[in-house]
Amino acid sequence: MVKIIIENLGQKEVPVTRTDEPALRHIQAQGVDWMHACGAKGRCTTCRMIVLKGGEGMGPHTAAELKYQKAGLLLQNERLACQALVNADIVVRVPEDSKLPHLKYTS
Ligand code: FES
């Protein structure tokens, strides 16, 4: 099964049960809290994830992601968890400024 590994949450493994739903849905389904200030509508960048491995196995950038890339608010190695589809195993990190205060990150 395809999975998302969240490196700085203790290598947490999140199974991807549907490739037509964005990463955030799968992460939340595993009970992992993840910043998503706009309610997963593609109107902020707080759900950013840094993609360390497997980015080529993700769905194409959405219009929202392209807009933020153009504005310099989303780097080449970052995706919006509420937008990006996952079709193959990926390894991601939570960016420093999107870490939630009540969670214990491993790095
Ligand atoms: S939660 Fe706002 S863009 Fe993803």
Image: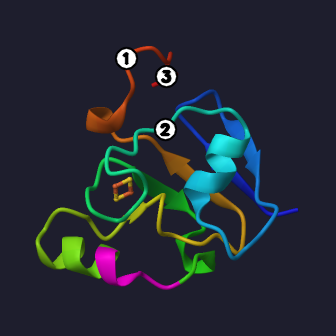
Tell me how far mark 3 sits from mark 1, CA to CA. Answer: 9 Å
Q: Position of residue 13 (x, y in %)?
A: 74, 42
Q: Position of residue 2 (x, y in %)?
A: 80, 63
Colour setting: rainbow
- The label shown at residue 101 is 1
The 10 Å Cα crowd at callout 3, few under 14, some 14 to 19, many 20 or more, is some
Q: Which residue is mark 2?
A: 34
Q: Residue furthest right?
A: 1
- Give the residue at x 40% y 39%: 35
**Ligand 1 occupies quarter:** bottom left
Magenta includes 63?
yes
Q: Which residues are magenta?
A: 60-64
Near-viewer residue (11 or 26) = 26
Residue 79 in the figure: left or right of residue 44: right
The residue lying at 47 percent from left, 44 percent from top is: 93
Q: Above or below — where is 35 with respect to 45?
A: above
